[in-house]
Amino acid sequence: MSYTNSGKREDGARVASLEHRLLTERNLRVLGGLAVLGLAVLAVLGLSVAPPDRYQGDAQRLMYVHVPTAMMGFTAFAVTTAASGLYLWRRTRNAHWDRLAVSSAELGVVFTTLTLGLGMLWGKPIWGEYWTWDARLVTTAVLLFLYLGYLALRRMIADPGTRARRSALAAIVAFADVPIVYFSVDWWRSLHQKGTLVNGGRFDPQIHGTMLLALLWGFGAMGVAYVYLLARRYLLVEMEEGIEERMLDVAIAERLAEAELDQAASVVETEVV
Amino acid sequence: MENANYVFTGWVMTGVVLCGYALRIAFRTRRAARSLGSGSVPQ
């Protein structure tokens, strides 16, 4: 079975054309600029404009980066899972989905690592500990290790088709932990606070208007940063695949040359004898 | 600002991690483009 389903070359060409139209250097620079601007405004909103929390004081200002990075981690893993599913489904199988899956998984790992780090820094002044064996913290750490495993698995398999199929399965299985992380504060007794914006399945913000604005801005700014980094990482995966193919061609050419030399040497030996 | 050390460490860490990751991708992309352009294979 090939890496790209040969019967779906038209779909592949369509995606490639969309890729060339959307992922231009100019578009990426604009997106990168927007991400930097968005994060700078977030810093102003979160560190200065939003008021301190009544109970937690200024330590709560970590929420404006902690919650958006957590949501971006979930989003990144959801994109990985969707792309993996599309790769596994024969009708939509294309290398583009595999590239999208791995690019997004790597970003998910970056955002989840940040989430854990920020949570630890927030936990110390509020709970008195950097780490506690709380359901939300443990399930998030498990999520991080699951996707680190996914990335490790990809490095272990040389054949692109086998690598894409096996890692796609692993990504889908790993995603089962995301709802467990999300609902862990409802399912188990937890030190971690419950949802700030969504309660009982409906949008019901429990925070001050300016705090809500900063938090929603944080989602937007981190979202733009995610899309920018995803596009850059995707293009890099594509280039690295090109290099991998070239390395394979060089290795095959070298082996063929060696075989020809061996053959020539054996002919000379026969003639001498 | 109370607990300023935790708050600023967190915000700076976010900036450093995101910028560091973006720079890493940029350097790897430049290296890959050079390698593809020159036709050489990275050793």
Image (cartoon, coloured by chain):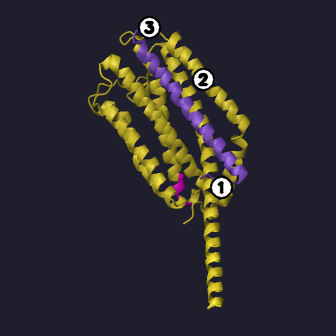
Chain colours: A yellow, B purple
Mark 1 or mark 2: name the one nearer the start of the chain: 1
Reply yes or no: does residue B18 show up in magenta: no
Q: Which mark is on residue B1?
A: 3
Q: Is mark 3 on a helix, strand or loop?
A: loop
Q: Which mark is on residue A38?
A: 2
The residue carrying mark 1 is A12
Q: Nearer the viewer, residue A46 or A268?
A: A268
Q: Give the range drawn in magenta.
A: A86-90
Check if mark 3 and mark 2 are on a common chain.
no
Is most of the magenta stretch helix, strand or loop? helix
Give the image location of residue B2, x and y in percent: 40, 9
Check if mark 1 and mark 2 are on a common chain.
yes
* Dot 2 amino acid type: Gly
Give the image location of residue A58, x and y in percent: 42, 12
Nearer to us: label 1 or label 3: 3
Q: What element carries label 1?
A: helix
For the point 49% across and 18% down, the residue is: A212
* Dot 3 amino acid type: Met
In the picture shown, does residue A83 fall above or below B10?
below
- Tell me if label 3 and label 2 are in contact, CB under 8 Å: no
